[in-house]
Structures are given as C-alpha cells and as structure tokens.
Image (cartoon, helix red, strand yellow):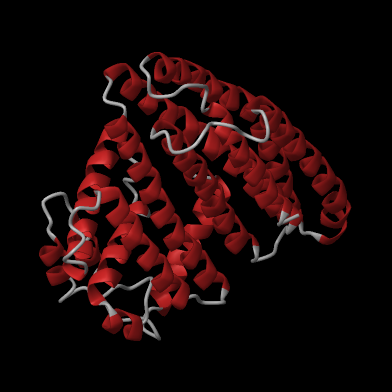
C-alpha cells in the first residue's frame, strides 16, 4: 500500500476507535470484531448470526443497520477483511476467500430473489455489491476521517469486483497456459498500480502540503484508479465473450507515454509551485519531511515505466495465447488505454 495512504488510514482507524461510542453502533472487543470476518466455511445464516453480537462499527449508523442487517454485516465483513493486516496474502489465498464470499453474496441474492436462481454467480455478486455501494453512499460522512473510511469501504467493493472478474476470466478461458498468464498479469498489474498510486499520492501530498484534505483525496484516488481497471477488464471479458470488439480509441503504448509524461510534468510543476512556500513558512521538521516526499516521489516516477512495460509484456504473451487458443480474434490489451487515461484524469482533478 502507498506509504502516505497507509499512515493516513491508520490514523483514521485510531480516530474512529476513539470516537465510535458516538453516532455509530456499539461493538464488542477488537478480538471479537476480528472473529466476525467471514471465513470460507461460513454460510449467510452463520454470518448474520455472528452479527447478533457484533454490530458493524466502522461503516453504518444504527438506522441503516436496522434497515438491512444482513447486507450491512456482509459489506462490513468485506471492509474489515480488506483493511486487515494480513491482506493481501498470496493470490490463490485471496481468490479462495473472495470465491466463498461471493457464494455468501449469492445466498443473500437468492433469498431476496427466489425466481432468479438461473443467473450466474457473477451477475448476482455484482447486484449485491451495487446494493452495498448504495448503502455506503447513504452513510457518507463529510468529515475528514469519515470521507477516508467512506472511500476505503467503496474500495473494498471495487477490489471484490476485481477478483470476481479474474475468476470469471479463468472460467471462460479453460486453458492452463492462459490461466498461468492471467495470474502473472495480476501480479504485474498490482506492482504497476501500487507504484502509480505512490506517484499520484506523493504529488497530491506535496500539492496540499500540511493539509488534512490529502487523506480523502488519496483514498479517493485509490478507489478511482482501481475502478478504471475494473471497467477495462469488463471490456476484455466482453471481447472474450464475443459481445464487442477490442477496438480502443488510443493505442496502449501511446496512453502509457502520455501518463508517464503527465506524472513527470505535474510533479515538476507542483514542486516548483510549493517549494518556495515550504522553505519560507514551514518548520524544519516539516521541510525535512517535504523533501523526503519529494525525493521518494521522484524515485517512484523513475521506477514506474519499467513496471508498466513489464505488465504490457505479460499482456503481449497473454494476447498471443488468447488468439491462438481461439478466445480472441485480436489483441485486447489496447482496451486498457482507457485505464491509463482515467489514471491521468484522477490526478488532474486534484492538482
């Protein structure tokens, strides 16, 4: 996780624990809360029963919990799991947890839609996650900490969608060589995404040096950048399903070059705009931290192109396998040009 974002979110958790006796629901001990995170053997009934002791602490107020207790516990369990210290573990471990979480979401969907059991687990999962997003939006808190938790909750749903799309892609491509490359693409993407988030958050922190707004902005960026991946991956699935072509408005390499140039130019402009103010107005400790951030962000920008190229190289191999095995008629990697364009737009909204 981004170093700035990690410290920001840790602060939010500390503040929340200190303030949770107010408008949010009362809880048991931290150990009991951890015990309520869904395990692979759980059923919907078991998860809801666990809520008889544990009422969601971080996400929802009492009225929302009362309106749909089962959904509140399901979404809160996802949030608690994603923000846990052990996450993420190895890909196959996380896939197993997410697969069983989807099973429980499908139980919830079937319980509320008894005539729709013929739908795929992915359609059902997406429907319940949409419902969860609407619940989170109703509980939005305009305070600094509230906005960070709000964004983190939405990110947990976005991440669940990422795992769901990966599983669906593996299900569609029943070929071991393709599946191995899909795992490699996932790993390469995560390294690239984490570094791009480091860059975006570093520039944002510099631009709003000393301001509390960086917490909400960085956590917002994390979710919006992940959502761009989800939207692009959905298009890839549509190509594999023969629902649409793989045409992209912008070549992937061109979108990559534009993103890298934008990050570099924006960093230079931000540094030039803020440096004089920091030198004149900040304490020595603050100045030292600023220049550490500046140095680290500069290094992150330098490291990012290699990670992007490694990810594209995996897609080159994956496209070849998909075409040769008949899953696609052309290269689909260029669909991800829209992801890079969105990553650029996300930071452009902040600075």
**Quadrant location of residue 251?**
top right
Q: Is residue 301 left or right of residue 224?
A: right
Q: From this view, report whether residue 264 is shown above or below residue 285.
A: above
Residue nearest the viewer, comparing 108 with 237:
237
**Quadrant location of residue 304?**
top right
Residue nearest the viewer, comparing 198 with 220:
220
Where is residue 236 shown, x and y percent of the image?
A: 46, 35
Q: From this view, report whether residue 25 is shown above or below residue 172.
A: below
Where is residue 211 shown, x and y percent of the image?
A: 69, 64
Where is residue 20 shown, x and y percent of the image?
A: 38, 78
The answer to whether residue 226 is visible is yes
Q: Is residue 111 left or right of residue 248?
A: left
Residue visible at 22% across and 41% down in the picture: 96
- Number of marks drawn: 0
Residue visible at 36% across and 67% down in the picture: 131
Q: From this view, report whether residue 266 is shown above or below residue 316.
A: below
Residue visible at 40% across and 49% down in the picture: 159
Residue visible at 45% across and 77% down in the picture: 138
Placement of the C terminus among the 4 image quadrants: bottom right
Where is residue 129 shown, x and y percent of the image?
A: 35, 60
Q: Is residue 229 left or right of residue 93?
A: right
The answer to whether residue 79 is visible is no
Q: Is residue 230 left or right of residue 304?
A: left
Residue nearest the viewer, comparing 309 with 198:
309
């Amino acid at each position: 996780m981004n170093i700035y974002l990690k410290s920001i979110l840790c602060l939010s958790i500390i503040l929340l624990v200190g303030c949770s006796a107010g408008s949010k629901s009362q809880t048991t001990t931290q150990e009991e809360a951890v015990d309520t995170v869904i395990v692979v053997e759980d059923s919907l009934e078991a998860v809801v029963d666990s809520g008889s002791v544990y009422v969601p602490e971080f996400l929802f107020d009492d009225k929302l919990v009362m309106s749909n207790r089962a959904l509140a516990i399901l979404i809160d369990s996802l949030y608690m799991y994603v923000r846990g210290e052990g996450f993420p573990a190895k890909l196959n471990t996380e896939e197993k947890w997410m697969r069983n979480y989807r099973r429980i979401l499908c139980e919830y969907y079937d319980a509320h839609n008894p005539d729709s059991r013929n739908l795929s687990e992915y359609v059902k999962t997406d429907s319940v996650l949409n419902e969860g997003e609407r619940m989170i939006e109703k509980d939005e808190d305009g305070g600094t900490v509230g906005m960070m938790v709000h964004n983190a909750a939405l990110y947990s749903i976005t991440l669940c969608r990422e795992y769901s799309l990966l599983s669906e892609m593996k299900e569609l491509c029943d070929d071991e060589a393709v599946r191995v490359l899909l795992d490699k693409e996932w790993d390469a993407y995560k390294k690239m995404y984490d570094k791009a988030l480091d860059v975006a958050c570093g520039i944002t922190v510099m631009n709003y040096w000393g301001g509390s707004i960086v917490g909400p902005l960085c956590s917002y960026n994390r979710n919006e950048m992940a959502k761009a991946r989800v939207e692009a991956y959905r298009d890839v699935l549509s190509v594999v399903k023969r629902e649409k072509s793989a045409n992209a408005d912008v070549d992937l390499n061109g979108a990559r070059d534009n993103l890298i140039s934008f990050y570099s130019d924006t960093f230079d402009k931000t540094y030039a705009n803020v440096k004089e103010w920091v030198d004149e107005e900040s304490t020595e400790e603050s100045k030292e931290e600023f220049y550490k951030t500046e140095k680290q962000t500069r290094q992150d920008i330098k490291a990012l192109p290699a990670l992007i190229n490694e990810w594209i190289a995996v897609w080159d191999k994956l496209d070849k396998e998909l075409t040769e095995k008949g899953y696609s008629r052309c290269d689909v990697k260029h669909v991800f040009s829209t992801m890079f364009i969105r990553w650029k737009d996300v930071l452009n909204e902040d600075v």
